[in-house]
Amino acid sequence: MARRASVPSLTMFSLMVIFAILLFARYRYQTANISTFTSQRVSDSTSSHHSFDIDQNLLHGNTIANKLDNETVKADLGRSSWKLLHTMMAKFPDHPTDDERKALDAYIHLFARLYPCGECARHFQEIIKKFPPQVATRSTAAIWACHVHNQVNKSLRKELFDCSKIGDFYDCGCASEGPSRNSTKDKES
């Protein structure tokens, strides 16, 4: 009997595919005619809230995966994916650069396209079309992710999460900048 790939393996594979696409897009951008790109980018940025270095068709294309029939794998994949997305939002910078905002926005759109459950991916694409990613700050990204997660929970008839508590629920695991003020207290305890 063939062994099935585990959900973490599927998640890692999805991440590798996303990063490969981003690297390819970056290479394509670097080899483009800079003067043509600059004039086009100025006009594009005034007509759209997205000004990516990535082809929009790549970000907004059809989903790639087929239906995922195994409900256990589907549920495990969903839990793992939400954990990944919420943790990513918790680690996103408080004051991101334009490049960091674009990277997160592109990641979310590619995630929706490449998600290994086709019907789930199509549903998530519909949700982010209705509620575009909010990537201005860590808190807006975290609240946006909570909101879209609740949209999925509504469709699955699951309990909704109180998004005002999202910062407490998903700890980013961030190291402090320099020594902790309570470091001597912690050692004494």
Image (cartoon, rainbow, N blue to C red):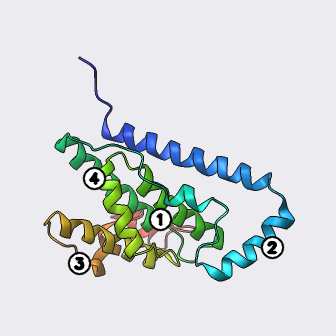
Q: Is the residue under label 3 in contact with that under label 4 (CB below 8 Å)?
A: no
- Amino acid type at circle 3 is Asp
Residue in the foreground of this view, choosing between 104 and 116: 116
Q: Nearer the viewer, residue 70 or 96?
A: 70
* Numbered tag placed on residue 162 in the rendering: 3
Dot 4 or dot 2: first in sequence order is 2
Element type where label 3 sits in the image: loop
Label 3 crowding class (10 Å Cα cut-off): few <14, some 14-19, many 20+?
few
State how far apart marks 4 and 2 are (Cα): 42 Å
Please say if the residues under marks 2 and 3 sit with CB atoms less than 8 Å apart.
no
Mark 1, secondary structure of its residue: helix
Q: Residue at x 34, y 66 (%)?
A: 170
- Viewport quadrant of the N terminus: top left
Q: What label does residue 78 carry, if any?
A: 4
Give the quarter of the image for residue 54: bottom right
Q: Where does residue 85 sit, x and y in percent of width and height? A: 39, 60
Q: Nearer the viewer, residue 102 or 55?
A: 55
Q: Residue at x 24, y 46 (%)?
A: 74
Residue with the mark numbered 2: 39
Mark 2 belongs to which amino acid?
A: Ser
Q: Nearer the viewer, mark 4 or mark 2?
A: 2
**In 3D space, how far apart are the residues under numbered discs 1 and 4 (Cα atoms)?**
20 Å
